Image: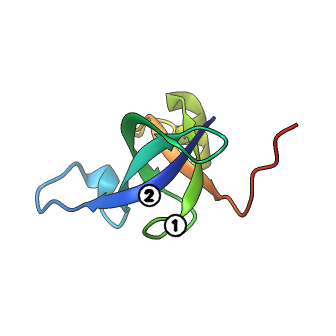
Amino acid sequence: MILGRVIGEIHGTIKHEFYANRRLLVIEKTSPSGEATGDYLIAVDSVGAGADEKVLVLDEGNGARQVLDSPDGPVRSVVVGIIDDVVTY
């Protein structure tokens, strides 16, 4: 699982049919304290995340396909949660 923040959205007119009616989000990876790590990824949105929201991303193809209920979908990363708060000990 990866912590991140939504920093953009990707739009395209020509795409694989799997991505029809699915939102692709650009996620900036963050530390638990919310600091940017300098890395990013692109993930399918499954929870309705919006701009600048903190999110939880599953970055593993088989798990992403299970979340999206598509056993052969061409996907690796999926946003699975919107984070309200992170508490570290």
Q: Quadrant of residue 62?
A: top right
Residue 69 to residue 85: above or below: above
Dot 2: few (<14), some (14–19), or many (≥20) neighbours within 10 Å? many
Total numbered labels:
2
What residue is pinned by disc 1? 49
Q: What residue is disc 2 on?
A: 6
Image side of residue 69 versus residue 77, left or right: right
Up-down relation of residue 48 to residue 27 (above or below):
below
Q: Residues within 10 Å of mark 1 (few under 14, many from 20)?
A: some
Q: Nearer the viewer, mark 1 or mark 2?
A: 2
Residue 58: x %, y % from top left: 58, 39
Asked if residue 69 shows in the view, the reply is no
Kind of residue at disc 1: Ala
Give the image quarter of residue 31: top right
> How does the figure colour the protein chain or chains?
rainbow
Q: Quadrant of the C terminus?
A: top right
Looking at the image, residue 32 sits to the left or right of residue 42; the answer is right
Q: Quadrant of the N terminus?
A: top right
* In the image, farthest residue toward the right: 89
Residue 7 locus on image (x, y percent) = 37, 58
For the point 42% across and 48% down, the residue is 27
Q: Which residue: 38% across, 38% down? A: 40
CB-based contact (under 8 Å), mark 1 and mark 2: yes
Q: Residue furthest left?
A: 14
Q: Amino acid at mark 2?
A: Val
- Which residue shows up at 43% across the image and 52% down it? 44
Q: Secondary structure at mark 2?
A: strand
Residue at position x 37%, y 62% in the image: 23
Residue 3: image location, x then y, percent? 59, 43
Q: Is residue 66 among the parts visible in the rendering?
A: yes
